[in-house]
Amino acid sequence: MERTAYRLADIVARFGGQVMGDADTRVQQIGTLEHATAGQIAFLANAKYRSQLEGSKASAVILSRADVDATGLPRIVCDNPYSYFARLSAFLNPLARYVPGVHPSAIIGKDVQISAQAYIGPLVTIGDGAVIGEGAVVMAGCCIGEGVTLGRNTRLYPRVTIYHGCLIGSDVIVHSGAVIGADGFGIAMDEGRWLKIPQIGRVVIGDHVEIGANTTIDRGALDDTVIEEGAKLDNQIQVAHNVRIGAHTAIAGCVGIAGSATIGKYCRIGGSAGILGHLQIADNVEVASFTLVGKSISEPGSYAGIYPFSKNDEWRNNAVHLRHLGDLVKRVKALEKEIATLKGEKV
Amino acid sequence: MERTAYRLADIVARFGGQVMGDADTRVQQIGTLEHATAGQIAFLANAKYRSQLEGSKASAVILSRADVDATGLPRIVCDNPYSYFARLSAFLNPLARYVPGVHPSAIIGKDVQISAQAYIGPLVTIGDGAVIGEGAVVMAGCCIGEGVTLGRNTRLYPRVTIYHGCLIGSDVIVHSGAVIGADGFGIAMDEGRWLKIPQIGRVVIGDHVEIGANTTIDRGALDDTVIEEGAKLDNQIQVAHNVRIGAHTAIAGCVGIAGSATIGKYCRIGGSAGILGHLQIADNVEVASFTLVGKSISEPGSYAGIYPFSKNDEWRNNAVHLRHLGDLVKRVKALEKEIATLKGEKV
Amino acid sequence: MERTAYRLADIVARFGGQVMGDADTRVQQIGTLEHATAGQIAFLANAKYRSQLEGSKASAVILSRADVDATGLPRIVCDNPYSYFARLSAFLNPLARYVPGVHPSAIIGKDVQISAQAYIGPLVTIGDGAVIGEGAVVMAGCCIGEGVTLGRNTRLYPRVTIYHGCLIGSDVIVHSGAVIGADGFGIAMDEGRWLKIPQIGRVVIGDHVEIGANTTIDRGALDDTVIEEGAKLDNQIQVAHNVRIGAHTAIAGCVGIAGSATIGKYCRIGGSAGILGHLQIADNVEVASFTLVGKSISEPGSYAGIYPFSKNDEWRNNAVHLRHLGDLVKRVKALEKEIATLKGEKV
């Protein structure tokens, strides 16, 4: 498509910051310092990439006051280049528009309310009594269960499933393959067989939440599973029944969160981390990738528990002793006693 | 929907146990001690929640003889409150019923046998020669391959894929996004390129198995991949080719099981655990979350291998020494020798 | 279906190797030594299964010169029995053929180019401007975004999603539930809220790549995410934005690869391993299952970092000391000093 080019002067008028160099420089897209071409604006948000300024073919650069003299390129100086870049990029790359209406191949149930301003794509199924808000976009192949509510401007990419009764807020984005509201893993052993426990809670998702591809969020067993507003979930995350994820918490890919865990606001959970069931995690907690949180965390801060990797044989030679670490500690204690005795004897 | 209310007297007549307090108390739904409202019955299965009895708004409670005096509420006393709750909840919350028939938008292949008592939802595809049993429910967007057999009362939630030739038992539940029978990861290196090894086995799933959302179970390379009856698999589990999972084994979310591993009956595998290929695991083995089982387990019991988490800098200060644990052990041994010598000299 | 039987003589004429025993022996399928029946040919690629030769009901066996005398069965002797088996199995089990054409239930956008030799299955959606190559197979329920290109003979199993603009090479196989080109996890914190960073790169996949069920590969933030030719990805792998995976690298199930990581050629990554963002991994690196690669690897070789599992209480008694490993090292150092002093005093 034909892109519009904007003058740096226009950009700072809209987003703030200050132009250094030719304010009439026009840009139409964002690029990396390394690969930007003419007509693109790059950004420097991390000092370690400063060397890339040299030789960058970008027409302009977004950077902080600290780096203002690091290049002769036309530039926009601002406090937070990364969020400035994010805002500018969102302006230059708006979400694809969809003409409102229901595709004739969609299968719509009884008593469904679909806003005249919503888009329902091909081969979508919507169960009885669902409510689809203004500006909502439901792409090809999505399956919306009975009585589901989708808020305003919420966008489901192709092949999302939402089970019956779930409540999805406004301005939510759900990526392809995500499954919201499947049964939680509730079973009870009874005379040698597992009994299935009906999962009668819902999933309730707040506004401005984003959910990644193939992520699964189970419905509550009795009460609801809740994702608070502004939380951001990456791909292939498993959220078990009755979990609560606090507002504006960001969770990287492949994390597993066990039943009834409660995670605070503004937390950051690294990729492939795990959180055991029935734990409480305070606000502003950061968990490293690959770390299992095995007990509640009441203090904000950064936590980790990762086995350091090394060459295979080196790892083997060290790891074997982990099975005897307790004995080693006893042996050291014994040595300390012996030394004390030897010294004592010399008195 | 309008729910029926049942007297406690009716409930014990059906499920056993003993009523204390007003046997005419009517309940129509299950609730938690914390959030139950009038008309709901809660349960106490774990002493640590006993304090929630006080102030619970439940109309009645299910509890064990040990807790019989812990509340004045009308109550049902039984041996196993949790399984009692499970059975009562299943009675109060039966699976949604589907009117038998094939939705006109479904695409049905040649020589397909569909029971007149089965439900085939919208936009389902069924390959040639498939057999769909009595009472089976195949929800929107499922893709059933050629020659697949679905047993009686088996239920596929939306967007399940079953590849050709797989055999699914009766009373099986498969949740949305699950993929059963995709090719196993079989490759052979040949002159710098990977050759694909055809995966000609099937997946065979026993009766009363439940499979979670976005779980994947690969078909066998030559022989079959087998999930025995009553096994329960949570979401996002990966089961590789030629794995065998024993009857009534329960596996939590995000577990990965490598090729040709054999897991016994009544095992419990914790979330995000892993099991390497070609291992045997005995019956009644419990594996903790986040634990990699790297060799066969012949003894029943509980096993774990988890790196304990801590504050990030504390973790760092300790973990660095793991790369030298072997040396540390040598140093301790040397010290023990020196001490022995010093003591000897004093004789 | 009716299978053709081939004489061992015909097979070696086609694939090389040497027949020992009756060259007129006919086989029509591959089997394992353990379960092969008459008319099947088994293979011995690993000495530890040699004992299975005895009593095998296979009509013939593929094995190496080293094992030539290990059985009296008719046999094919070759240098690499495993790749020989792979080639023969591919010959005996060709990919299912699909009659070219577009199923009437498919929804095709504007300006789409579909080769007359391609197959588009039922309930597929294809966005405007997509290009589908000769011999391509797109099975039921796939969603192909606008402007996507699928190369020759590329095969998508049911319910694959490919987002707009992605470029898929030739002879690629993508299994059910995979999602290619969803937004990378790009967010910037700004005054207490996460701003979404538009993901405007693509996913570019080379020829002869295979991608497993429910694997997710995110589109690049600004530049592209790249999977080079011949790479093989198993199920439920998460590939974040701007990752590059080198040619002929094989990755087992459940691996997570964080943003902008670069993995070399001919690497092998074990199941459930993890690779942190912005790392470089050299060619020919092997990473063990369950290992987190936390810094770049410049040397080929095998690497691991796995906590060894043991009985639960044994693990507990040892693991508790990991939180004090630094102190233990200090105590040992102190002891070494004391001993040195004591010895000195005796001089």
Image: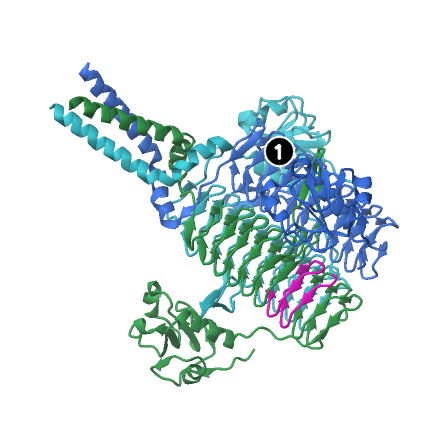
Chain colours: A cyan, B green, C blue
Residue B158: in magenta span: yes
Q: Which residues are magenta?
A: B146-173
Q: Note whether A255 is above or below B180 in the view shown.
A: above
Q: Main secondary structure of the magenta part?
A: loop
Quadrant of res A111? bottom right
Residue at the outermost right position: C116
In x, y percent, where is residue B154? 62, 69
In x, y percent, where is residue A186? 49, 64
Residue drawn 79% across and 57% down? Answer: C121
Query: What is the number of callouts on the image?
Result: 1
Is residue C202 visible in this depiction of the protein?
no
Residue at the outermost top position: C347
Quarter holding the N terminus of chain B is bottom right
User: From the viewer's perspective, is A199 left or right of A19?
Assistant: left
In x, y percent, where is residue A22? 68, 26
Quadrant of res B147? bottom right
Is residue C121 visible in this depiction of the protein?
yes
User: From the viewer's perspective, is C331 left or right of A89?
Assistant: left
Which element is circle 1 on? Answer: strand
Quarter holding the C terminus of chain B is top left
Q: Please tell me which residue lies in front, C177 or C44.
A: C44
Q: Please tell me which residue lies in front, C168 or C218.
A: C168
- For mark 1, what is the residue? C262
In x, y percent, where is residue C311? 39, 49
The subunit carrying tag 1 is C
Question: For the residue marked with disc 1, what is the amino acid?
Answer: Thr
- The crowd level at tag 1 (other Cα within 10 Å; few <14, some 14-19, many 20+) is many
Q: Please tell me which residue lies in front, B117 or B1.
A: B117
Q: Please tell me which residue lies in front, B30 or C91.
A: C91
